[in-house]
Image: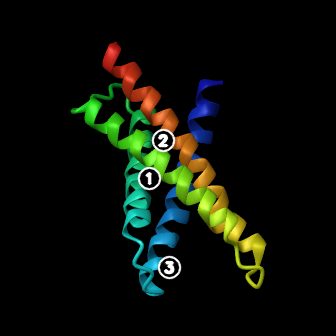
Amino acid sequence: MKALLKISLTLICLYVFLAKTYAIVFSLVKHIGDWPVLLVDVVVLCACVLLVLFLWRNRANIRYGMIWCILIVGAIFAQLYVGLFNFLIKDPGVDQTRVLWAFDLPNLLSLLILVVLMIMIIKKRHD
């Protein structure tokens, strides 16, 4: 069961990593200069990589855990704002299925990744 959870979280991280990379490239190509959104996307990319490393390494030692937790909490609030804002201002002329798979679902799953990573950092810190 534990291996199935690791594989599932790794696949979710891979999906969110690819979708957030697409979102960053899309914003840079379209010259959308929303730097807080890009910063949150970069934090989510780092969180995806860090979570996968935590999952598959036997001994995960992270330095500056409190700073990571503060950064993750800030990213959670910013991701909530960005995700809800993007969800509420959808353009009806755009294919909604593509927007759902490329932007909305990764925004929701990135919240899951950030929360799981924060729990793992706090748990490792107290061990």
Q: To which residue does mark 2 refer? A: 114
Q: Quadrant of the C terminus?
A: top left
Mark seen at residue 12: none
Q: Is residue 41 left or right of residue 81?
A: left
Q: CA distance from mark 2 to mark 1?
A: 7 Å
Q: Earlier in the sequence, mark 1 or mark 3?
A: 3
Q: CA distance from mark 2 to mark 3?
A: 22 Å
Is residue 99 positioned above or below 70 on the image? below
Mark 1 lies on a secondary structure that is helix
- Whether label 2 touches label 1, CB < 8 Å: yes
Q: To which residue does mark 3 refer? A: 26
**Tag 3: residue type?**
Phe
Foreground pick, 22 / 14: 22
Q: Residue at point 55% right, 50% down? A: 80
Residue 61 seen in this snapshot: yes
Q: Quadrant of residue 72?
A: top left
Is residue 71 positioned above or below 97 on the image? above
**Residue situated furthest top in the rendering:** 127
Mark 3 lies on a secondary structure that is helix
- Whether label 1 touches label 3, CB < 8 Å: no
Q: Position of residue 95 (x, y in %)?
A: 76, 79
Q: Residue at point 56% right, 34% down? A: 6
Q: Quadrant of the N terminus?
A: top right
**Tag 1: residue type?**
Val
Residue 62 seen in this snapshot: no
Q: To which residue does mark 1 refer? A: 44
Mark 2 lies on a secondary structure that is helix
Is residue 76 positioned above or below 81 on the image? above
Q: Quadrant of residue 31?
A: bottom left
